[in-house]
Image (cartoon, helix red, strand yellow):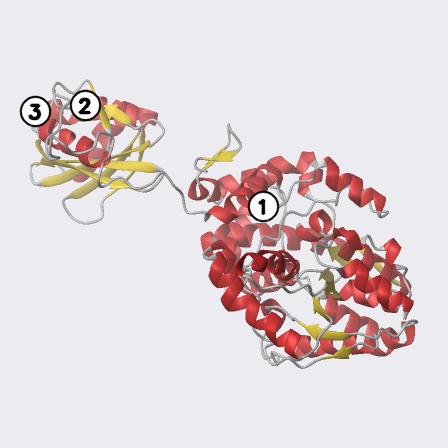
């Protein structure tokens, strides 16, 4: 009889770096975090290796990202593949060709959450009525993170500079006018210390929690 | 000569440099040296940051404390929020060995270490106790004839273990009285200004938190409000402007304790850059100089 650990090891062999952590929260349950791009590879591994029964897909809207949980029953073990897609991308490959029972649930998730399933063979509504407004997905939350509107600019400034307020040329001039150095001796004005500060933000996970995009130096929401 | 490490924080040097310059002149006249803490970051703030991510809050605070430990002097923040963060982070790291180990591991990755050897002193404590209230009184050159309402700010009431919650607020009151100012009793001194709730509900913050304080200050015939917190300063200054939208007009000058003391020590207002303020502090200072 297959065990939870065997499923994890098999996926690990197939996916390598595309597989994240896995957990066995209780007997006969295993959750495996995977990269969305490796979803089909993971499902192929389960289908060909274990001939599982597809149970369903759960969708959770976290505000900035949508988490998709693909549940399979393998000889009495429920194995769940966890893939998280950013709302900016908003799409993932279909698995309908490998597990036909996913056909309806992918259409339902598309209706309710607005997630697009690439190459789905029948991309039309399932549960919403025909006259439902296009683009309106009733279970989809606004694209927003946890930082309240009035704190978004200070948080962006903090993550990009190390201080809550920008050291602008205007501030520098005004400081010099009253006889102070143009900037305080802080991370925001000592550029060689900024990488250390920003690495702390990464290592504590604050950047992800706040929804910060390091490339754009902005929060992922306005 | 007394020596302290100065923790400037973000808001004071970048938004209200008059508070910084006043503190430097003030400590200078008291022959107390302020050594700048080099390479510090945002403290970070003790309300939003700590609520959102305690680990990040503690790690950054511990990094700042480790820098201060390297200097080897008591660290003096000019801001209530920085004071609370540094004091409470230090207390948490002493109280929780597992947390201390976890945060210590992160700091070590950057070659830093905090051994718990820093004493954090609010600038009110540094002035009142370490320099001494009697020395302050001796240095007053100009008696300030003004009716002052004190707003202590919530964080000044945070007691260290076993401390009377009014210990630091009472020190602030004595320091203001030392300038000759008449401290008015308006009854709601201990209430929050409403700054944190601005993030959630502007109308509530202004009309239910700030406005009752302004009304009572007005009733007590106060001529200014004295603060020790940049967030409270922002709330009083921009809050009074925003309240006009709701039909309420108040124009209390909101002066920082360091600025008030500097004026009493005879520092000319022109040297303080009081035009950083968004309330009529400059006009108040000129009037006090003229008296």
Position of the C terminus of chain B, as image quadrant, is bottom right
Residue under numbered circle 1: B108
Up-down: is B5 above or below A5?
Answer: below
Q: Specify few, some or many for label 1: CA neighbours under 10 Å numbering under 14, 14-19, or 20 or more.
A: few
* Chain containing the residue with disc 3: A
Q: Is residue B159 visible?
A: no
- Distance between the alpha carbons at the discs numbered 2 and 1: 45 Å
Report, in whole angstroms, how far the alpha carbon at label 3 lies from the one at label 2: 10 Å
**x, y percent for residue B101:** 51, 55
> At which x and y percent is residue B76?
73, 61
Disc 1 element: helix
C-beta proximity under 8 Å, tags 1 and 3: no
Residue A184 to residue B180: above or below: above
Protein chain holding label 1? B
Q: Nearer the viewer, mark 1 or mark 3?
A: 3
Pick the residue in front: A135 or A46: A135
- Identify the element where label 2 is drawn: loop
What is the chain letter for disc 2? A
Which secondary structure, mark 3? loop
- Which residue lies under the disc numbered 2? A94
Q: Work out whether residue A132 or residue B261 is closer to the camera in this orientation and state it.
A: A132
Give the residue at x 88% y 60%.
B28
- Residue holding disc 3: A100
């Amino acid at each position: 009889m297959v065990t939870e650990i065997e499923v994890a090891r098999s996926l690990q062999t197939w996916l390598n770096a595309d597989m994240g952590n896995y957990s066995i929260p209780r007997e006969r349950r295993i959750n495996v975090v995977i990269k969305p791009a490796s979803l089909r590879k993971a499902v192929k591994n389960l289908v060909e290796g274990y001939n599982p029964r597809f149970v369903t897909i759960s969708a959770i809207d976290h505000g900035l990202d949508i988490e998709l949980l693909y549940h399979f029953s393998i000889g009495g073990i429920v194995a769940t593949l966890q893939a998280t897609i950013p709302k900016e991308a908003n799409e993932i490959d279909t698995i309908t060709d490998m597990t036909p029972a996913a056909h309806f649930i992918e259409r339902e998730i598309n209706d309710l959450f607005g997630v697009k399933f690439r190459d789905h063979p029948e991309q039309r509504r399932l549960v919403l009525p025909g006259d439902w407004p296009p683009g309106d997905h009733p279970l989809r939350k606004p694209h927003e993170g946890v930082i309240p509107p009035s704190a978004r600019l200070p948080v962006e400034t903090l993550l990009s500079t190390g201080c809550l307020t920008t050291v602008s040329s205007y501030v520098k001039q005004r400081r010099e006018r009253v006889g102070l150095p143009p900037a305080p001796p802080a991370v925001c004005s000592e550029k060689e210390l900024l990488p250390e500060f920003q690495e702390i933000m990464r290592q504590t996970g604050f950047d992800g929690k706040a929804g910060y995009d390091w490339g754009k130096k902005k929060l992922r929401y306005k | 000569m007394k020596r302290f490490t100065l923790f400037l924080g973000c808001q004071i040097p970048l938004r209200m440099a008059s508070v910084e310059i006043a503190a430097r002149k003030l400590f200078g006249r008291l022959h107390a040296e302020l050594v700048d803490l080099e390479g510090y970051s945002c403290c970070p703030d003790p309300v939003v940051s700590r609520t959102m991510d305690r680990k990040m809050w503690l790690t950054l605070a511990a990094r700042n404390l480790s820098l201060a430990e390297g200097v080897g002097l008591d660290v003096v923040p000019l801001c209530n929020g920085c004071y609370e963060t540094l004091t409470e982070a230090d207390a948490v790291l002493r109280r929780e060995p597992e947390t201390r180990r976890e945060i210590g591991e992160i700091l070590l990755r950057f070659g830093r270490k905090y051994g718990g050897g820093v004493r954090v002193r609010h600038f009110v404590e540094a002035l009142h106790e370490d320099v001494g209230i009697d020395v302050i009184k001796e240095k007053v050159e100009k008696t300030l004839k003004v009716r002052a309402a004190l707003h202590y700010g919530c964080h000044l009431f945070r007691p260290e273990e076993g401390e009377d919650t009014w210990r630091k607020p009472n020190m602030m009151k004595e320091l203001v009285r030392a300038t000759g100012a008449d401290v008015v009793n308006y009854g709601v001194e201990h209430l929050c200004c409403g700054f944190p709730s601005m993030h959630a509900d502007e109308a509530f913050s202004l009309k239910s938190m700030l406005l009752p304080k302004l009304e009572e200050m007005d009733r007590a015939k106060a001529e200014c409000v004295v603060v020790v917190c940049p967030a409270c300063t922002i709330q009083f200054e921009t809050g009074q402007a925003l309240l006009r939208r709701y039909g309420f007009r108040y124009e209390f000058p909101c002066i920082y304790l360091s600025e008030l003391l500097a004026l009493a020590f005879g520092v000319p207002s022109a040297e303080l850059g009081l035009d950083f303020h968004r309330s009529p502090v400059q006009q108040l200072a000129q009037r006090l100089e003229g008296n």
